[in-house]
Image (cartoon, helix red, strand yellow):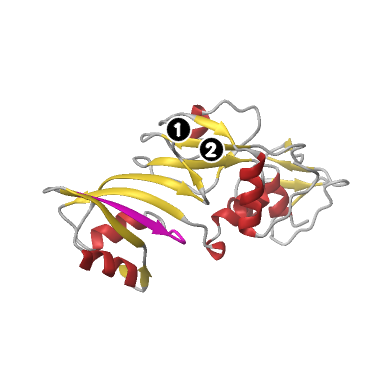
């Protein structure tokens, strides 16, 4: 097993962050500090530590669906002492969020210690659907909706798109439903700013088929077996060991 995959499977972080930990020299395998990517380990035989703490694969995986409130950081830890999503849920396992929501964005967020599933759900290649409700400034007409579908330049050389429909129109603002198949950082806010309708309030209502309702902000629950099976099918994985 690749070392970065092992770290992710232990619930440490995404593979990208696992790569960073390796390159920073924080990972030791059988007493040898690893400083390059590509190391292969045997989980049954090798002793692997991160920052001096031994890592072991979780015996069972856990999958938690959280309605993330606004004002909470999508991170396992925060160096500035702000409240994180792990402060909101009650979990003995070392969970980490799949993807991220901005500090002021609320909505559905998945937390797990299943590194393989988390990696695929967050990777753009698998085009996992994300659906948002966004209050944006001023009335929005169908020309803007079509423009969003065609694609909007958010920075030189970067064009993004989203399927939008108008839910409610008021004199000073509009409620849109926006569906993304991949997500750049702050994509909806950047898209809407580019078309002249800055986001006033943002909520993710669906992620990978998981709906935030009826959970209220700050509420959470464990996924059902059927929901986990559906996530595995969505990204082309097979579950092992009946977990």
Q: Main secondary structure of the magenta part?
A: strand
Q: Which residue is mark 1?
A: 215
Magenta span includes 182: yes
Task: Inspect the magenta stretch and tell me whether residue 84 lies in it.
Answer: no
Q: Secondary structure at mark 1?
A: loop
Mark nearer the viewer, 2 or 1: 1
Which labelled disc corresponds to residue 4? none
Q: Position of residue 205 (x, y in %)?
A: 41, 45
Can you tell which quarter of the image residue 50 is in? Answer: top right
Q: Which residues are magenta?
A: 174-183
Q: Position of residue 7 (x, y in %)?
A: 69, 47
- Residue at x-position 52% and y-position 58%: 128
Which of the 4 image quadrants contains residue 195? Answer: bottom left
**Residue occupying image coordinates x 81% and y 53%:** 41
Q: Is residue 25 visible?
A: no
Q: In the image, which disc is placed on residue 65? A: 2
Depicted 144 relative to depicted 55: above or below: below
Judged from the image, the secondary structure of the residue bearing numbered disc 2 is strand
Are circles 2 and 1 on residues that touch, CB within 8 Å? yes
């Amino acid at each position: 097993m690749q070392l970065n995959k092992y770290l992710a499977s232990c619930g440490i972080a995404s593979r990208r962050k696992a790569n960073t930990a390796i390159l920073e020299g924080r990972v030791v395998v059988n007493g040898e500090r690893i400083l390059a990517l590509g190391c292969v380990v045997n989980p049954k035989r090798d002793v692997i530590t991160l920052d001096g703490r031994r890592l072991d694969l979780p015996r069972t995986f856990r999958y938690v669906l959280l309605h993330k409130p606004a004002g909470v950081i999508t991170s396992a830890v925060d160096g500035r002492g702000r409240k994180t999503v792990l402060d909101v849920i009650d979990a003995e396992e070392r969970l980490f969020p799949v993807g991220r929501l901005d500090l002021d964005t609320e909505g559905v967020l998945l937390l797990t210690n299943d590194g393989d599933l988390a990696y695929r759900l967050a990777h753009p290649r698998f085009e996992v659907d994300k659906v948002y409700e966004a209050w944006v400034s001023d009335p929005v007409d169908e020309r803007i909706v079509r423009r969003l579908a065609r694609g909007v330049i958010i920075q030189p050389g970067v064009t993004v798109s989203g399927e939008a429909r108008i839910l409610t129109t008021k004199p000073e603002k509009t409620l849109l439903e926006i569906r993304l198949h991949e997500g750049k950082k702050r994509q909806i806010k950047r898209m809407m700013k580019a078309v002249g309708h800055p986001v006033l309030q943002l909520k993710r209502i669906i992620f990978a088929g998981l709906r935030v309702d009826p959970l209220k902000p700050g509420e959470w629950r464990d996924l059902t077996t059927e929901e986990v099976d559906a996530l595995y099918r969505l990204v082309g994985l097979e579950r092992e060991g009946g977990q």
